[in-house]
Amino acid sequence: MSKRDMKRILVTGAVGQIGSELTMALRERYGNDNVLATGRKTKPSKTLLDSGPFEFIDICKRETVEKVVDEYDIDTIYNMAAILSATGEERPLLCWDVNINGMYNILEIAHERDLTRVFVPSSIAVFGPETPQDNTPQETVLKPKTMYGVTKVAGELLGDYYFKRFGLDIRGVRYPGIISSETHPGGGTTDYAVEIFYEAIKNKKYTCFVKKDTVLPMMYIPDCIKGTIELMDTDISKLKHHCDFNLTAMSFSAGELAEEIKKHIPEFKCEYKPDFRQAIADTWPKTIDDSAARKEWGWKTDYDLAVMTKDMLEKLGKRHEEGNL
Ligand code: AKB
């Protein structure tokens, strides 16, 4: 088997919202033993632990990453470990450390060992108030006002630098808010779009931390996992962009999401009490132009607001009935 065909994958941040489901999808595809899940502190789920190898590492401590990369003969890294926007405003130095110094360690390790491919996610947080908020173009002003956004812009640039300078095959997308039912998001501005489902099922009411008319780009987790893996599978000759693909599936206001949930749970009530995360949301796009992703690697979505809402409520409703929510 040539080096290009081998797949020995490391997922950092595998206990997180995207990492946990990405790890399971990669294990299904490449074999359980070929996908090493890693986390820093949080206890992994039984599903993650029982289905394949797991190690605790800290991407800010380079030697802990080097150890597992060498021990497991890793050739591909999905660097999903990150501090998100809301936590980033509360702990800016930690955000810089994990998102920049941690990412730098990953890139150096990948470069030194000539790894096959690296995925490093970016976010809609790279945009700021000077960016057009409707149909935000692929190439546009990047002047974020959060520490998270600053680290994501720097991360995109760093990734492109390693590609140009060292030929490291590194890829990434600007994730919108991700909605999922397996693992809670933590510390993001778009977390309300997940919390609302749990509260609708459990308590039939929710107090939303952004205003009713706040519109943000969103995506259901199956689309997110599909897109991530498809980008990593694409022949590099097709890619003009590398670390900064705009990506979206749907855009809706917090009020529209509440209305969609009400169609299934008529007694559901949503109140709006904006907190500091409103100011972050106000600087992000409402809708995104992801035509570069569609053109260069065939990106397309399967889930819109109605289909996603129905699926989320069914999944969480079942877990609630079983007493597992
Ligand atoms: C956040 O809200 O911080 C993240 C993101 C959009 O990157 N979900």
Image (spheres, grey):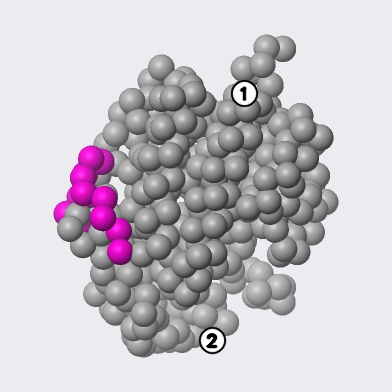
What residue appears at the point 41 percent right and 25 percent down from the top-left corner? 164
Disc 2 C-beta below 8 A from ligand 1:
no
Residue 21 point in image, percent of width and height? 62, 51
Quadrant the C terminus occupies: bottom right
Q: CA distance from mark 1 to mark 2?
A: 51 Å
Residue 114 disc label = 1
Is the residue marked by circle 2 packed among few (<14), some (14-19), or many (20+) residues within 10 Å?
A: few
- Kind of residue at disc 1: Asp
54 relative to 280, above or below: above
Say which of marks 1 and 2 sits in front. 1
What residue appears at the point 34 percent right and 35 percent down from the top-left corner? 293
Is 137 within the magenta? yes
- Kind of residue at disc 2: Asn
> Circle 2 sits on which residue?
203
Residue 158 point in image, percent of width and height? 43, 39
Instruction: Indicate left or right for 129 with 247 as reference.
Output: left
